[in-house]
Image: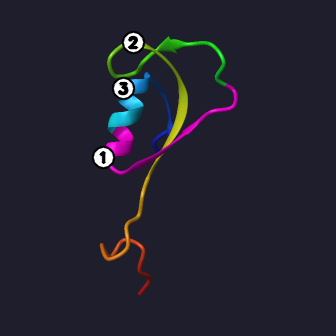
Amino acid sequence: MVDPRRTLCARCVRDYKTAGFSVVHSVNSTIKEPCDICARPGFEYVVRTHQRKGTGQDEQN
C-alpha cells in the first residue's frame, strides 16, 4: 500500500487538486520541508484519489 502522506509546496498542491485528487493539510505539519516533487518549501498533506460519478469506480456489482 502506498503512503498517502506527501510533502508538497503550494504549487504542487494546486496541481494535484487540478488533476482531481483530494488534498488535505496534515495537522502534524507545522515546519516547512522540501517538496517531494520540486524541493520548494512545503507542508505535509494527505493525498487521496477522487472517485467521480459515472466512471464505474464508485459502483458496486
Quarter location, residue 26: top right
In percent of the image, x 52 and y 12: which residue is there? 33
Q: Give the residue at mark 2.
A: 40
Instruction: Using the image, tell me which numbered label, if any, was put on residue 19.
Output: 1
Q: From the viewer's perspective, tell me whether residue 60 is left or right of residue 26.
A: left
Q: Residues within 10 Å of mark 1 (few under 14, many from 20)?
A: few
Residue 45 x, y percent position in the rendering: 54, 33
- Closer to the camera: disc 2 or disc 3? 3
The kind of secondary structure element at disc 1 is loop
Which range is magenta? 16-28
> Given contact means CB atoms under 8 Å apart, are the residues at marks 1 and 2 in contact?
no
Residue 40 x, y percent position in the rendering: 39, 12
In percent of the image, x 37 and y 12: which residue is there? 39
Tell which circle, 3 or 1, labels the residue nearer the N-terminal end. 3
Instruction: Residue type at mark 2: give it.
Output: Arg
Q: Residues within 10 Å of mark 2 (few under 14, many from 20)?
A: some
Q: Count of labels shown? A: 3
Instruction: Residue type at mark 1: give it.
Output: Ala
